[in-house]
Image: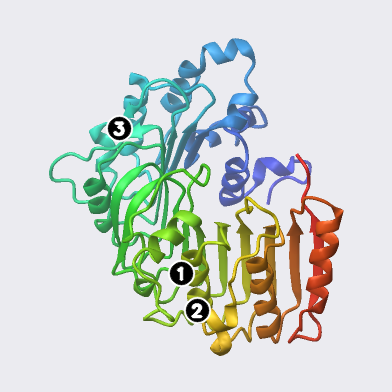
Amino acid sequence: MPDSTSDIISHLPGNVLDKILMCLPIQDAVRTSLLSREWRYAWMKLPQLVFDEMFYRDLNKTMHAKLLMIIYKVMFLHRGPIIKFALSLPGLESCSEIDQWILYVSNNDIQDFTLHIWEGELYKLPSSLYTCSLLKHLSLSFCMLKPPPGFEGFTRLLSLNLDEVVIADDVLSSLISSCPLLEQLILSTSLNSLEVIGPNLKSVCCFSHIRAICFTNTSHLANVSLCLEGGKNGGEISSSVVLLDSIPVIEFLELDFRYVKGIAACGVPTRLPTTLNNLKNIVLYDISFEERDEVSFLICLIRSSPNLEKIAISAFPSATFAISVDLDFSEMHGCSDVSLNQLRKVDMINVSGTKPELEFIKLLLAKSLMLETMLIELKAQNVADELRILEELTRFRRASPQAEMILVRQAVH
C-alpha cells in the first residue's frame, strides 16, 4: 500500500494512466512528465500520436516555424508500438519528412493511420505505407495512391476514407476488393467508374462525382449515401449508377437527383426486383416533382420499401410557383397498392406548392397509418401562396389520427 501521504496520481494503475494520457493533446501528454517520477516517461509509451488542429492551436507562432522539428522530437523520444498516428495540420504541405514518419510508424505496429495534406502539391505516398499489414483504419486527403506491383491489399482494414485522392478507377476497385474485412468506405474523390466488391461492407458514402458505380457481393451493405456537390446542372450520371437489387439489406439510402436520374434512365419498373424489407430511412435531394422520371422512381422506391419509417425529401424549386402539371399519383402510378404502415416521420423541404408536390404529400398522408410528424418547409413567393397551400393541406385526409403537420417558412438568407 502506498503511504497515505503520497499523492494519488503517482500510484495510478498503468492502464488508467494510459487512458488519461490518450485523452490529452500530445503536448499536454508530454507536459505530464513534470507531475511525478512515475509520470516522467509515461507519455513516451503512448500507443497513439495525434498531430491535429488541436495540437496546432496550442502552439505559439514561434513554435509554428519549428513544427516539423517538434514532431521529429516527439517521434524520436517515443518508445514502443504506435497503434494510431494522425497528421492533419493547417497549412501542412507535401514534404520529404512525411516519408520518414510513415516509414517509422510502418515499423511500429500501426493500425490507425490518418494523413491530411492541406496545401501545396499532391503527396505521393511512399512504398512503406503498403507494408502496414496490421492497418485497420486509413484516412487520406490530397494524396496520390499508387500501390506497388505485387501489393495484396490491407487484409485487416475496416475503414477507408479518401478525400481528394488521386487513384485510378481500376486500382481503387482492386484495393477495395483486396480488403475482405472492409466495413466502411467514404469517398470524396472524382472517378469515372467504380465497382465496389465488399462481402463485409456495411456503409458506403460517396460525396464526389462518380459517373458509374455498381455493387457486387455486398450482401451486408446497410447504409448507402451517394451525393454530389454543385447545382442542378453539375453533370450527368450513367444509367448503370446503382442497382438497388444488389443491396438487399439496405437500411439507410441517401441520393441526390443525379443518381435518381441515373437509375431512372434504365427505365423505372412498377416495383423493384427485390423488395427492400430492411429499408427504414430514405433521404433524397433536389427532386423535381415536375420530372416524371424522378417521380416514377420515388413511387417505385416507396412501393418497394414496405417498412419505411422516415422519408426526407428536398424539392428542387419550380421555375414557376404553383405550376399546373397533370400528375395524378393514384392513377398514373397505380398507388392503390402502396403501403406505408411503418412510416413515422416525413420531412419535405423547399416546397413551392406545386400540384405534384401537394399530390405527393396527399398520398403520404393517406397511406401512413402510423405517421406521427410531417414537417413541411415552405418556399412560397408571398403570403397569398402560403395561405393557398395551407388551405389545400388542411383538406387532405390523414390515415393516422395522431399525425401532426408542422409548417415552417423557409429562412431567407
Residue 33 place in picture, x, y as percent: 61, 29
Q: Name the residue located 66 percent from the left edge and 60 percent from the top edge.
A: 323
Residue 331 place in picture, x, y as percent: 56, 83
Q: Residues within 10 Å of mark 1 (few under 14, many from 20)?
A: some
Which of these two is toward me, 84 or 155? 155
Q: Name the residue located 35 percent from the left edge and 59 percent from the top edge.
A: 241
Which of these two is toward me, 54 or 284? 284
Is residue 53 found left or right of 147 in the rendered image? right
Report the residue marked by disc 2: 278
Does residue 204 appear anywhere in the picture? no
Q: Residue furthest bottom?
A: 337
Q: Residues within 10 Å of mark 2 (few under 14, many from 20)?
A: some
Amino acid type, mark 2: Asn
SS class of the residue under badge 2? loop
Report the residue marked by disc 3: 125
Report the residue marked by disc 1: 222
